[in-house]
Image (tube, grey):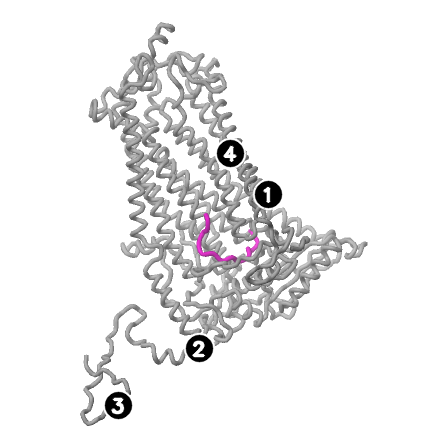
């Protein structure tokens, strides 16, 4: 083993070039595009990547003295190694008053492209596929012969091909191989450059971009670049009710980002039926509110039910005073919520199953079905920080190495820190609980009658807002801490690094966002005791549910956290990138203008200089995390808030356009990354879907009044007459004698404070309901999983067809294969054709057949 040193990190900018709207012989009679500025000084060599870095510049000091000699040496070594790899290079400098921006333009010649395309198994076209990708909603509307308002005609749709792995010696068999400039797509050229830069010592990659503004005079749509098309037909707010041009997104950003937007659009589309059902259930609550017998009984009770004080210094109160709040609770706590819970549990399972089908269709369409990093290279940061090297037993090459025992100890330490942060979240939760209890007491002691009447409501609402602020602050703190911990754990590959980071953050965010709703749903009001024997927390009496029950408080908590978080995130996503981009461009333009005034010459800004002013792409982690947390809110706690899917749908319509604008107009173009699916996020979504089944079962059983009403309906009165009195217990005899007053409280206890038989009957019913509910939903979900294959039948057929074509194209004995393989039995359009008879005529009796030869069959 050998000790290792540090390495230099450079910034990489990818460039878009217009020729990628052409694909060999596929693009016919296209208009001549305008002159491309993304070229070398010769005007013909295309720029594939741009390396960029800044150096301090002082006209009075030589540049060599202002630079760190160690960095200069590493950079020169890196650039020399790039030259040896066969890349074409050209240097450009932009001098500003205090800094010098150095650009290294990179271009891969044809021979280098062919070598690395075969090395990294790029797939190239064999034949055009005429069948186009059809959205599920478009298919449904077409089947119903209804117009589709979501459809739009996006120009220059990328064609779909049957493809196979590239082989240099079979070049003539690939479609479009006669045009070397357009044979490899721009994203494929980026992958080749990424591979070269990753293999070259002392180098790593970053991001970049190109121009997006549409010309003032409308040009022919065929001459528009991909980024211009995405800006005009995707990133505009007017496209909110249109399908996303996924093929264009994939052509420009690569499969990983395209799959995110495909998943987000698919998820948003599936929110439509969920929001419709949730809204109908909520509206049905208005009808139930006006016809509910217990509500009428409570509102007309007058002073029949005098309730015990809700705090030690509070006074007795009349149960009929909460008439409005009780009716409002029926909007969120009625029989329809049971149906909605079952519906959303099955919706989540079905959504994930159909997403797998859609993902398999897209991954095959985008040539990622068999994409696997069999031996993923080490992360650049791991390579730079690994303390030693070890010989790879397979390749025999020296590779950076970090001892597994040390990594395990560091991972264990990270888990301990995660547990500590979870404890911190729970401590803040307890603090907010105490805040609500103390604030209710303080307001109750005030002299304002309005505030006294609404003390619990004010304390609950302000506690929810305070909880949201604590959640957002702790989220930022822990995400930064998780970055540090995951880097410290020294994971070898980028995939392992991302999976561990996502797992850490999700576990923390799951507790951070859902701890307060879980407390309100399952613990609040459960451990309060009874008059004369109340339980306390740090000397403060445990808080009880509000007048309308815990479910309406849970709905309030969900709306404040989910909707408040969405509003804050959308404002941040809309305002912050624009402010950062404006400041960065203003700073750069100010320096350029100052330089123009000094030299008296107008500066001609190159495309890579414009791109350098854009922001670095922050990746997809925060985007996925936001949607996953939202998915948890609308599935785990949907029984308490039927409107949650509707708010999620509205948010996602906005989210898609905000993300599109960020990626197209404000971020540098990210390095193209391939992906088969959405990765570990699918496992996280499946975990949430299973948790949602259990969460809704317990929510209906222990928090909703559905089962107590059902029990009373079948054991006492079918019309629920007297239900209010059934749910109220009399204060214990000792308490009544001490206070010389008998009051009521919610519970199933006798005059001695002991549980009544009805309490145990209901407990058995509740536990039975949980078991039956989750078994039925899981069984139906399993049946859906079995009935819905992950790969559609038409995709399997295309995969087989593609495999056959690839085998034929790459076969050495192709000519012999064509003569021996029958091709006239089946038409690839799927229509059967008449098969020729293989029967031979009877042999001529005069003809003598040799016994040594195999005689052909003559009978059928």
Residue 667 painted magenta:
yes
Q: Position of residue 824 (x, y in %)?
A: 29, 76
Mark 1 vs mark 3: which is more N-terminal? 1
Q: Please tell me how crowded label 4 is: few (under 14), some (14-19), or many (20+) other residues with Cα within 10 Å.
A: some
Q: Please tell me how crowded label 1 is: few (under 14), some (14-19), or many (20+) other residues with Cα within 10 Å.
A: few
Q: Which residues are magenta?
A: 666-680
Q: Position of residue 829 (x, y in %)?
A: 31, 69
Q: Secondary structure at mark 4?
A: helix
Q: Which mark is residue 484?
A: 1
Mark 1 vs mark 2: which is more N-terminal? 1
Residue at (75, 58) in percent of width and height: 599
Q: Position of residue 786 (x, y in %)?
A: 30, 51
Depicted 205 relative to depicted 350: above or below: below
Task: Tell me the quadrant of the picture where the C terminus can be found.
Answer: bottom left
Residue 586 visible from this viewpoint? yes
Residue denoted by label 4: 422
Residue denoted by label 3: 850
């Amino acid at each position: 083993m050998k000790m290792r040193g540090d390495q230099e990190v450079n910034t990489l900018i990818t460039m878009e070039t217009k020729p990628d709207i052409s694909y060999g012989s596929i693009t016919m009679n296209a208009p001549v595009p305008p002159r491309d500025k993304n070229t070398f000084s010769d005007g013909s060599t295309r720029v594939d990547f741009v390396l960029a870095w800044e150096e301090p510049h002082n006209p009075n000091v030589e540049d060599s003295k202002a630079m760190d000699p160690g960095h200069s040496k590493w950079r020169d070594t890196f650039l020399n190694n790039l030259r040896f790899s066969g890349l074409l290079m050209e240097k450009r400098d932009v001098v500003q008053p205090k800094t010098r921006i150095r650009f290294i333009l990179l271009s891969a010649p044809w021979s280098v492209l062919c070598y690395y395309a075969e090395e990294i198994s790029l797939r190239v076209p064999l034949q055009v596929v005429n069948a186009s990708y059809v959205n599920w909603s478009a298919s449904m509307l077409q089947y119903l012969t209804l117009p589709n308002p979501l459809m739009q005609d996006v120009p220059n749709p990328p064609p779909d091909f049957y493809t196979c792995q590239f082989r240099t010696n079979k070049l003539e068999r690939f479609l479009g191989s006669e045009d070397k400039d357009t044979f490899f797509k721009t994203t494929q050229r980026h992958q080749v450059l990424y591979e070269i830069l990753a293999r070259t010592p002392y180098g790593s990659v970053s991001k970049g971009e190109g121009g997006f503004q549409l010309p003032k005079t409308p040009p022919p749509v065929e001459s528009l670049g991909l980024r211009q098309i995405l800006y005009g037909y995707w990133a505009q707010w007017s496209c909110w009710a249109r399908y996303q041009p996924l093929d264009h997104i994939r052509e420009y950003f690569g499969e990983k980002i395209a799959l995110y937007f495909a998943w987000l659009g698919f998820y948003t589309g599936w929110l439509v039926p969920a929001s419709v059902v949730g809204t109908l259930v909520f509206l049905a609550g208005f009808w139930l509110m006006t016809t509910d017998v217990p509500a009428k009984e409570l509102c007309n009770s007058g002073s029949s039910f005098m309730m015990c004080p809700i705090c030690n210094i509070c006074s007795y109160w009349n149960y009929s005073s909460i008439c409005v709040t009780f009716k409002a609770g029926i909007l969120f706590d009625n029989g329809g919520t049971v149906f909605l819970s079952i519906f959303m549990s099955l919706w989540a399972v079905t959504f994930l199953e159909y997403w797998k089908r859609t993902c398999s269709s897209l991954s095959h369409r985008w040539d990622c079905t068999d994409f696997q990093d069999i031996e993923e290279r080490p992360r650049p940061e791991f390579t730079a920080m690994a303390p030693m090297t070890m010989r790879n037993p397979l390749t025999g090459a020296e590779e950076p190495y970090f001892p597994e025992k040390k990594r395990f100890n560091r991972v264990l330490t990270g888990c301990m820190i995660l547990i500590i942060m979870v404890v911190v979240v729970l401590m803040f939760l307890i603090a907010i609980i105490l805040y609500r209890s103390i604030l209710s007491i303080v307001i109750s002691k005030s002299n304002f009658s309005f505030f006294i009447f609404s003390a619990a409501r004010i304390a609950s609402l302000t506690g929810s807002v305070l909880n949201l602020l604590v959640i957002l602050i702790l989220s930022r703190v822990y995400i930064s801490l998780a970055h540090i911990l995951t880097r410290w754990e020294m994971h070898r590959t980028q995939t392992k690094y991302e999976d561990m980071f996502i797992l850490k953050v999700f576990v923390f965010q799951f507790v951070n966002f859902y701890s307060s709703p879980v407390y309100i749903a399952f613990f609040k009001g459960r451990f309060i005791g009874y008059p004369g024997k109340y339980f306390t927390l740090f000397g403060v009496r445990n808080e009880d549910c509000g007048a309308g029950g815990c479910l309406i408080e849970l709905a309030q908590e969900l709306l404040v956290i989910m909707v408040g978080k969405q509003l804050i995130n959308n404002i941040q996503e809309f305002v912050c990138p624009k402010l950062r981009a404006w400041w960065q461009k203003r700073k750069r333009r100010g320096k350029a203008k100052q330089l123009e005034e000094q030299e008296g010459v107008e500066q001609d800004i190159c495309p890579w200089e414009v791109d350098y002013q854009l922001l670095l792409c922050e990746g997809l982690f925060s985007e996925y995390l936001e949607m996953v947390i939202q998915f948890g809110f609308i599935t785990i706690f949907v029984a308490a808030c039927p409107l949650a899917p509707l708010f999620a749908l509205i948010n996602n319509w906005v989210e898609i356009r905000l993300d599109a604008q960020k990626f197209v107009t404000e971020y540098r173009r990210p390095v193209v990354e391939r992906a088969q699916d959405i990765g570990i996020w699918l496992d996280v979504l499946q975990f949430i879907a299973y948790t949602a089944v259990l969460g809704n079962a317990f929510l209906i059983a222990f928090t909703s009044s559905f089962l107590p009403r059902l029990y009373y309906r079948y054991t006492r009165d079918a019309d629920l007459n007297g239900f209010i009195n059934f749910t109220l217990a009399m204060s214990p005899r000792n308490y009544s004698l001490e206070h010389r007053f008998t009051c009521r409280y919610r519970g199933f206890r006798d005059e001695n404070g002991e549980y009544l038989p009805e309490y145990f009957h209901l407990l058995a019913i509740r536990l039975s309901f949980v078991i039956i509910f989750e078994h039925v939903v899981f069984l139906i979900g399993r049946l859906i999983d079995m009935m819905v294959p992950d790969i559609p039948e038409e995709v399997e057929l295309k995969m087989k067809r593609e495999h056959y074509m690839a085998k034929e194209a790459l076969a050495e004995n192709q000519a012999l294969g064509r003569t021996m393989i029958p091709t006239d039995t089946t038409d690839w359009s799927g229509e059967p054709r008449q098969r020729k008879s293989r029967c031979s005529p009877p042999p001529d009796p005069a003809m003598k057949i040799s016994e040594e030869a195999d005689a052909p069959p003559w009978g059928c």
